[in-house]
Every structure is written in C-alpha cells, then in structure tokens.
Amino acid sequence: MYGTALLLHILAATIWTGGHIVLSVVILPKVLINKSAQQLIDFESVYEKIGMPALIVQVLTGFWLAHNLVPNFGLWFDTSNPISRVILLKLSLLLLTVGFALDARFRVIPTLNDESLLDMAWHIIPVTLFSILFVVVGVSFKTGWFF
C-alpha cells in the first residue's frame, strides 16, 4: 500500500508542478505581453480539471505517507526528529500554497481583468516556486538533504 500511495503522490506532484511550470514559463509571459486575462482564464479552466484533483491526491497521500513515517501526529512538530523536520517543511509549503490560493480565489480572480494581471502573476510565481520546493523537500526523504 505504501508503494501505491507514493506512486500516486509522485504522479500528482508531476501534474501539479508541471502544470505550474508551464503556466509560469509559457502561459504567463504571453498573458502579460498581450495583456489578456482571457488567455489566463482559458488555461486555468482546462488545467484546473486535472490540477485540482492532483492537489487533492497529493494532500491525501501526503498525510497518509507522513503518518506511515511518523505515526504520532504530535511528533510531526518535533524539530529534533529529522523526518519530522521534513514533514514540517512540507506542511509549511502546503499552508503557504493554500494561503496564496485562497487570496487569489477570493480577492484577485473575482476582479481579474487585463489591468490586474500583474497581481495574479504575483500569485502564480510563488505557488510555482512552492510546488518546486515541494518536490525538492519530498526528494529529501530519500536523500537526507534537510535532515
């Protein structure tokens, strides 16, 4: 079961992170040059259909995997435990991602137009960086980079 959860977690991370890299590196520059909120909305409407389920799979499998590594939830916050430090880093990235997503969803997107695209860019770029850091921190479970 652990192998299946890890595989689903990695596949979902691939979709989430890859989609955000494409958004940041390919779509966003075109959107900003053309000053076209519609181009961004068009990409988001397609990507959201696979990106959001991927994020949900990542969160669910991530909690399950963390519980398998450190079964006592209270110990997830024990910074003297190297595995717990990595779990804590992942949880911190999750909170940052959720914070940016909620701000975008409730403040930026409802008023998104061709003139407010820069505000949306200031959400897209950090979330992309967080997603890349999720992968780097996840790899550290095997490499020990953050231990």
Image: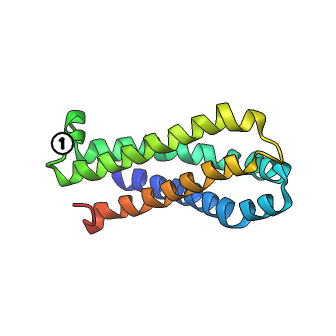
Residue pictured at 24% horizontal, 50% vertical: 85
How many numbered circles are shown?
Answer: 1
Q: Quadrant of residue 23?
A: bottom right
* Residue nearest the viewer, comparing 119 with 77: 119
Looking at the rendered structure, the secondary structure element under dot 1 is loop
* Percent position of residue 147, x then y: 21, 60
* Residue nearest the viewer, comparing 75 with 112: 112
7 on left or right of 25: left
> Hey, what amino acid is under mark 1?
Asp
Residue pictured at 14% horizontal, 49% vertical: 80
Density class for disc 1 (Cα within 10 Å; few <14, some 14-19, many ≥20) is: some
Rendering colour mode = rainbow
14 on left or right of 37: left
Above or below, comparing residue 109 to residue 51 in the picture? above
* Percent position of residue 39, x then y: 83, 54
Residue pictured at 38% horizontal, 44% vertical: 92
* Percent position of residue 125, x then y: 59, 56
Residue linked to disc 1: 78
69 on left or right of 37: left
* Percent position of residue 84, x then y: 23, 48
Residue pictured at 67% horizontal, 53% vertical: 121
Q: Quadrant of residue 29?
A: bottom right
62 on left or right of 26: left
